[in-house]
Image (cartoon, rainbow, N blue to C red):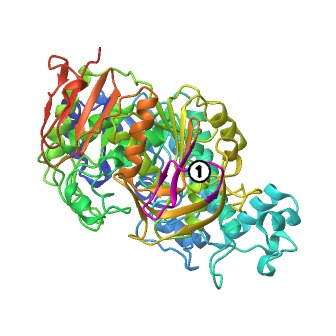
Amino acid sequence: MTLGVCYYPEHWAPEMGPEDAKRMARLGLSFARIGEFAWAPMEPEPGRYEFGWLDQAIENLHAEGLEVMLGTPTATPPKWLIDRHDDILAWDEEGRARGFGSRRHYCFSSETYREHSRRITEVMAKRYGGHPAVTMWQTDNEFGCHETVRSYSPMARDAFRGWLSAKYGDVAALNEAWGNVFWSMLYRSFDEVELPNLTATEANPSHWLDFYRFSSDQVMSFHREQVAIIRQYAPDAMITHNAMGYFTHYDHHDLGAEVDVLTWDSYPLGFLAQGPEDQSRTLRYLRQGDPDMAGFHHDLYRGCAPFAVIEQQPGPVNWAPDNPSPLPGMVRLWELECLAHGGRFSSVFRWRQAPFAQEQNHAGMLRPDSEPAAAFHETDEVAKELSLLSDDLASSKVALLFDYDSVWMSDIQPQGTGYDGLYVAKDWYAAARKLGADVDIVPQGTDLSGYAVVLVPSLLHLTAETAEALKTTEARVVIGPRCGSKDENGNIPDGLAPGPLRELIPLTVARSETVPEGAGGAVAGRGGWKAWRDECETALDPLWTDEAGRPVLYREGRTSMFAALPERELLTDYLAEVFAEAGMDAERLPAGLRLRRGCGLRFAFNYAPEAVRLPDALCSDDAFVIGGRELPPAGVSAWRET
């Protein structure tokens, strides 16, 4: 477990480099990430390379004992390359080319761009692959940021046709899978298939689903091209790519299979305005972030590969609707929370705040005048605390199944404004964490035999392997409404929902409704349901009904299934019962307090704007290694469990 920083030596006078490296080393940092946006400084004209500045930056860092994570610069193709090849540009959903002047202005399906990306990657890998300081590589930067996974260019259309041909073989099979007899959408050949944008009204949902899958696959093939080159010249280097928060346009399980460590960019305050949280909750956590945002992504990406944070928010950012300052101590909390969840390292973005261009209002560890900012001092604290931590990651008793295909299906046909597959999964995660549970977020096909409780919040489509794992596990299984409601093509399955889950709980969903906010129902003394409700045919008596007598929850043996989407309080109430049955602790934590086992310790993180006290039953007063029983706002405590 180490600490790092994102560094942009091309932004600063060369004579600042040696002192920057010395300060990083004194602070206790182990590495710096550089280069991921610097194509034009590296190659100012076609075929003319200027690596002197980068050579010197790497030598400055190496001289102080720091390692280097070197990024391929393909997120920012230079102007001369765009001017020569306008087929590089991505097209937006309205059919417009996305122009030069910022970043990520390329299409994953452009063969011209892929050729140049391979070229610059090979030039860099040949030059730096054997350098003793360059131990890590990052491909590109934030695949898909700014809505760029799904390009609607002619290149994407042609590549999509080829992808469909490889998948289906015969266009008749595509017509059958998509149900193209509906609205006379039958195709005679793959060359007739267009992209699903710009239709007069809603395009076929199966068409959209395959386009989403194709677009995700294009990201992966682009990434693999760079990885293959880096492996050739730097076979022992660690390779990563930086994912983002609340982003599902490509499948991170696929990316996890292609990297040594999956990193992500953690901006808890920037992300606070996203999602369905109400204004009162946003104001409560304005300077801390949602208590479950970072944890959810740590555990989601840990379920894809070994994970780390490569960009940790250091202060106000520049891109959210509002950009408050973190509460004092929050950067330290976020960094320690990453490590407690099993992160290999935590790295702050960025070393020094830029006084120019798009991110000049984005804080760094240093101010533009090189004076330390708050994140500098808080990272200094974490560096001193690293010696108290081990690399142990405790096993979790709760698994939460998460699937990108299912998220895409609910995005394509949400059916109502209140259902979002990603946020449903996060809601269930938050309910379990509020009870003090550690949670593994795992993909379909995971062996579930070691868990006490398995949560299935929003798997619209289940693979046969997942259905069998749920059938054979001895864990308590809690299933959300809408699960099992789609086949692999995004259509209603034979026998209706819940499809293969019927082997666990004998019911059939005869009809489903969605309702606007405030039109759900209440379960006496427990909370309510919202957004989605299934009407079920079954011989089972409902375990819970709402005030109108409508079934909300069914149970058969160790399997429970909600017939309506539970609000968080209702779900937390039921999970407390399920956890207790499974022999787990199930005490509700104070608002804003979260626990996590890891690093040989048990941690408590206080996201609340007020001080909280740890329950006496959690630990003895003499067990604390960090902090104590009373946690101030942004406070962290950690203790050894016996």
Furthest residue to the bottom?
Answer: 200
| In-front residue for pair 357/165 | 165
The residue shown at (23%, 31%) is 25
Q: Amino acid at mark 1?
A: Leu
> Toward which corner of the image does residue 488 lie, by quadrant?
bottom right
- Position of residue 310 in the picture relative to residue 119 (left or right): left
* Residue 553 is a magenta residue: yes
Picture coordinates of residue 67 (x, y %)?
A: 36, 31
Instruction: Name the secondary structure under disc 1.
Output: loop
Q: Is residue 570 left or right of residue 351?
A: right
Q: Residue extending furthest top?
A: 642
Check the image and report above or below for 69 versus 39. above
> Residue 517: where, in percent of width, then height?
40, 70
User: In the picture provided, is 579 more to the left or to the right than 269?
Assistant: right
Q: Nearer the viewer, residue 95 or 325?
A: 325
Q: Is residue 382 above or below residue 360?
A: above
Q: What residue does disc 1 label? A: 459
Which quarter of the rendered picture does the N terminus lie within?
top left
Residue shown at the point (19%, 21%) measured from the top left: 625
Do we see residue 123 in this rendering?
Answer: yes
Report x, y in % for residue 158: 73, 68
- Residue 40 at x, y percent in the picture: 43, 59
* Quarter-of-image position of residue 580: top left
Residue 181 falls within the magenta-colored stretch: no
- Residue 35 visible in the displayed image: no
Question: Would you identify the image quadrant in which residue 447 lies?
Answer: top right
Question: How many numbered marks have been drawn onto this rendered protein structure?
Answer: 1
Q: Is residue 153 above or below residue 116?
A: below
Nearest the eye: 12 or 7 = 7
User: Magenta stretch?
Assistant: 536-555
User: Quarter of the image containing the C terminus?
Assistant: top left
